[in-house]
Image (cartoon, grey):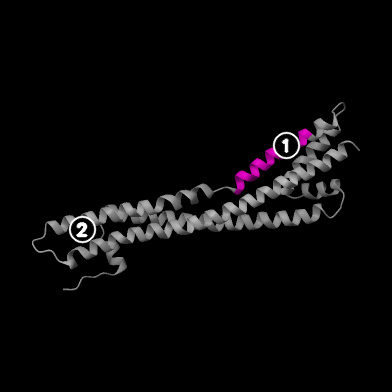
Amino acid sequence: MSTDMSFFHLIAGASFVVQLVMLLLLVVSVMSWTMIFRRRTALIEATQAANNFEDRFWSGGDLATLFREVSDRRENIGMAGIFQAGFNEFARLRNQPGVEPRAVVEGSQRVMRVVLSRETDDLETHLSFLATVGSTSPYVGLFGTVWGIMNAFRSLGNAQQATLSMVAPGIAEALIATAMGLFAAIPAVIAYNRYSNDVERLINRYDNFLEEFSTILQRQSHA
């Protein structure tokens, strides 16, 4: 008598614990892929916005005109948001009587640092989840495998005559849990490493722009 070793039959015949592990890994994998695509879209948009703003900023135009253009937009991210917050604070402090130029620049820098911190948090959204999935999914799948193999050998011990066909389905269904754990973990690890590098590069660009813009504001404050 042949045993049905199809993929879906093995899953349907698995024990409740192994099925629960598989379901958990499937849900985690779907969530992971959703966040991977969302982070990819967000990082592409952030990079394009940074490129466009840098081209406009270093084109040699008037900063006040650029500030009005940026302020007319409904939402500014990255460098545009840092510039808008810094220039707005610079103009506000500069118009106040008795405020020293150094205090004007330092106040603008503090505001820009706050915006930079917020932008960093936005860029790093979901990265911790991808790191968690990449590090824990193989162990969750391994737990399902161990549980399935344990049940297979328990049923083998109660049999009068042990054959390979009796234990093969249990071991096969258990190994599916390990495969699903790796399927969830590998893309998450790759995406986390790639996106972490992209985020770090963007943050460095934001920080460099902040310092360069602070230098420009310092020159204007003494003008």
At x 65% / y 45%, what residue is drawn? Answer: 119
Picture disc at residue 181: none
- Mark 2 residue crowding within 10 angstroms, few (<14) / some (14–19) / many (20+): many
Q: Quadrant of residue 148?
A: bottom left
Label 1, on which residue?
A: 111
- Mark 1 residue crowding within 10 angstroms, few (<14) / some (14–19) / many (20+): some
- Asked which secondary structure carries label 2, the reply is helix
- From the top left corner, tell me how far across and down residue 57 is, in percent: 80, 52
> Residue type at mark 2?
Ala
Q: Main secondary structure of the magenta part?
A: helix
Answer yes or no: do the residues labelled 1 and 2 have beta carbons within 8 Å? Answer: no
- Residue farthest to the left? 160
Q: Quadrant of the C terminus?
A: top right
At x 22% / y 54%, what residue is drawn? Answer: 150
Quick check: 194 left or right of 216?
left
Quick check: 35 left or right of 170?
right
> Residue type at mark 1?
Val
- Residue farthest to the top? 98
Residue range highlighted in magenta: 106-123
- From the top left corner, tell me how far across and down residue 47 is, in percent: 67, 56
On the question of residue 6 being in view, the answer is yes
Label 2, on which residue?
A: 152
At x 77% / y 36%, what residue is drawn? Answer: 108
At x 72% / y 48%, what residue is drawn? Answer: 79
On the question of residue 13 being in view, the answer is no
